[in-house]
Every structure is written in C-alpha cells, then in structure tokens.
Amino acid sequence: MAGVLLTWSSPVFPRLNTINDDNPFGKVVTPSEQSLISSLLPLGASLGPIIAGLLTDRIGRKKTLLIFSGIPLAGASITLIFAKSILVYYIARFIAGVGVANTFVVIPIYLSEISEVSIRGMVASSFGFFCAVGQLFSYSVGPYVSIVTFNTICAVIPILFVLTFLFCPESPHYSISKKDMNTAQVSLSKLRNMSTEDVDRELKLIKENVENALKNEGIILDIFTNKGYRKAFLICLGLFTFQQFSGILAILFNASDIFAASGSSLDSSISAIVIGAVQVFACLITPIFVDRLGRKMLLQLSVIGMVISEIPLGLYYFLKDHDYNVESISWLPVTCLIVFILTYAWGLGSVSWILVGEVFPTNIKAAASTMVTSYCWFLAFVVSTLFLSLINLMGMGGALLFFASCCCVAIVFTFCFVFETAGKTIQQIQEMLNK
C-alpha cells in the first residue's frame, strides 16, 4: 500500500488537470494545489515516525503496524473515494503519509528481528520489492479506471493487510524485552523451520543480546554522544539526503507528466508502466545480490548508474526546452529513466533502509529509526514541494541536472563513509562503528 500511495498522484493528476466527468472538483487544479497534493503525503510521513518511535517499544511492532499504519491507510483511501473538496484531499493525503511513514520505520525493524542472519538482507529487501509492486500496480491500474474506482481498490489493500497481519507473530526481540519468554518462544517457533533445541538455542542468544542492550538502554541524546551511534546516524542521514536529492520521489509523483513533456511517441501511461516494471525487476534481483555483493558495492553501483542515466536525461530536456529538434532521440527519456529507476531500486532505494535496521542496536534502534525516517520524509516533502518551482526556474532539464549533481556527490560519500555490514551480527557491526 505504501508503494501504491507513493505513485498514486501519477495516474490521478492528468484527470485533475482537465475538466472531465472523472474530476471530483469540477475544476482544473492549479500548479500550487497539485504541488500540495503531492507534498502533503511526505509532510505527514515526516511526522508519522514520531508515533512509531514512541509506540514500537511500548506496544510492540505488530500493534504499531496494525493501528498506526493499516487503519490510517484504509481510512485515508476510503475518504478519497467520497472526497469532492480539495481540502479533503489534502487531509487524506496527510493522514496517508502518517501511515506510510510508520511502515518505513517499523517494518525494517520487524524484518531484521524475525530473520536469520544468513538471509537477513534478502528478507529486509523484500520490503522494497513489495513497495515497487505497489508502484507498478498504481501505474498499471490507475490510468484505466475512474478515480473513485482506483481509490476503492486502494482502500481494499490496507483492509486486507489488517485482517491477515493479525495472524502474524510478534517480534521475539520485543517479547523478550517485555520478559514474555513464552510468547517469544511461540513466535520464534513459527518463524523457524528447525527443531525445538535449535529454537531454544537461538532464543537464548536473542535473550542475551536484548538483555545486554537493555542494560545500556539508550536515549535520543546517546545518538549524539556515543561514537558508534553517532557514526551510524550520520551515515544514514547522508544516504537519505542523497536518496531524496536524487529526485526520485519528484519523478515518481510526476512520471506521467514527465513523459508527456518529453514529446515521445510512446503513451505516457505505458511509459510509466514500463518504469514500474523495471523497478519491480530491480527489487526482485536485489535480495539475490544484497548478501553476495554486499551493501556497499550495491550502493556504489547504484549511485554511479543514477549519474550516468540522469545527466543525459537532463540534457535531453535542456535541449528540448531550448527548441532543439530532439525527435531522433525521443527514445532517450524512457531509456534513461529505466536505467535510473533500475539502479536506484537495487541500491540507494533499498539498501539505505536495510542499513537502518542493521547499524543501530536494540536499545537505540527505535529512536534512531524515528529520527532518520522523519528526516528522510521531510526532505521528500521539501523536494516534492520545490520540484515544480525548480522546473519554472530552471526548466525540466535544469532540475534533472541539479539532481544529477547531487548523485555525483553521493558517489564520493558511498566510497568514503559507508562500510560493509553483510553477513555480520549486530554486535560485529557495533564494533566496527566504534573503531
């Protein structure tokens, strides 16, 4: 559902930009209104992690996801079905952002805690894969059904999530932190296809790790005073700064409009579907390589690929904006965006979230994840708000070249400051951070 909402605006905006029977407002939305509809989701998402951070260690990972992700996402989508006022759209998008952000905080924690070390990277990266599936769903279905029908389908997804996730186990780490060993044992038994003796052995190890972490239970201030925590925090902030200033959300939110502006003979909706399919493919292969090649190498390949694709894309639009004949290279925008999305999805888009679940120990993980995720979504709000202004100021080409220059800096950052975490325990990662 998070993926669907991230690209929800792409098939909806073309209908809101004209007066037609499918436009619920009966008028054309202005550029500033369109910008607000886009940006209020990441604004809500920048506040949502605060809720998750406060509650994930108090009521558990499972209840936090059910109550503060599933229910807000369902409520926002149901509201959009009946909305006739742009103000209601604003409110619904903001609430949806709160729910989306909670998933980005809690799911990486939940997946890292229920996974075996040998497959932790693969399991954690599945979150990015299903987000990509949601985005493809939005691109594939949204343009071909009415806005009301699309929002109805969007409402069904979180409702199904709530009904099915009720039967999933709580994180054994959380249960142990609350001294509920029976629940932890039952949960781990459901999660592991192994003998009772092996389950008990792993449970004992988890118990030792959780107890050691809780003996040094952290507070937000520790993130800045502890060398290892501070280093992990700065690495995550750097990755998410470059993630958002790559322009990814601005491109996803406005994919159909970007393709329409390219002048390509390929229908903009079909082009968006191609991009969505590429992202699914990239996320599908990420779990295969994330533990084999390692997090650092995937990040390096990712940002290099993004630079290689975004610079010619920006130059194409720059030439087009200055009335050069670009008919002979009308294939370039789709090709560049395919490479851009492919390389983003297998590295900067997925590995950044994996690292959030890996580089912080249990005692500080919730607080750190909250701050990092809020920061990420606030930057997304800033970029999506400024995107149309950047286009008006610099043209589409100038805006894309600005994002490409940010990716160039990201190359230096990943080579110099990111270290490898694949195949390492949380304790080993902390030892590396404290060196």
Image (cartoon, rainbow, N blue to C red):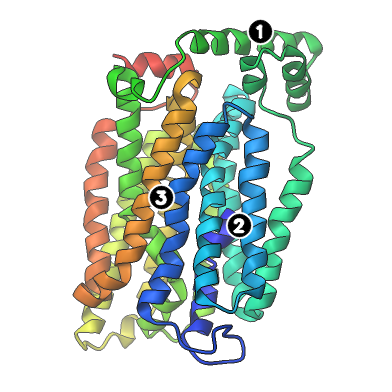
Front residue (pair 168, 63): 63
Q: Residue at x 32, y 58 (%)?
A: 382
Reply above or below: 282 against 194: below
- Dot 2 alpha-carbon crowd within 10 angstroms: few under 14, some 14 to 19, many 20 or more: many
- Dot 3 alpha-carbon crowd within 10 angstroms: few under 14, some 14 to 19, many 20 or more: many
Residue 278 seen in the figure: no
Reply above or below: 226 against 156: above
Mark positioned earlier in the residue sequence (1 or 2): 2
Q: Which residue is drawn at 60% across and 59% down?
A: 134
Q: Give me the disc on residue 133.
A: 2
Q: What element carries label 3?
A: helix
Q: What amino acid type should be assigned to the residue bearing mark 3?
A: Trp
Q: What amino acid type should be assigned to the residue bearing mark 1?
A: Lys
Percent x, y of residue 403: 27, 59
Which tag is nearer the camera, tag 1 or tag 3? 3
Q: Residue at x 54, y 44 (%)?
A: 102
Label 1, label 2: how many angstroms apart (C-alpha)?
A: 37 Å
Quarter of the image for the C terminus: give it.
top left
- Residue linked to disc 3: 377
- Residue linked to disc 1: 204
Q: What element carries label 2?
A: helix
Query: Answer yes or no: do the residues labelled 1 and 3 have beta carbons within 8 Å?
Result: no
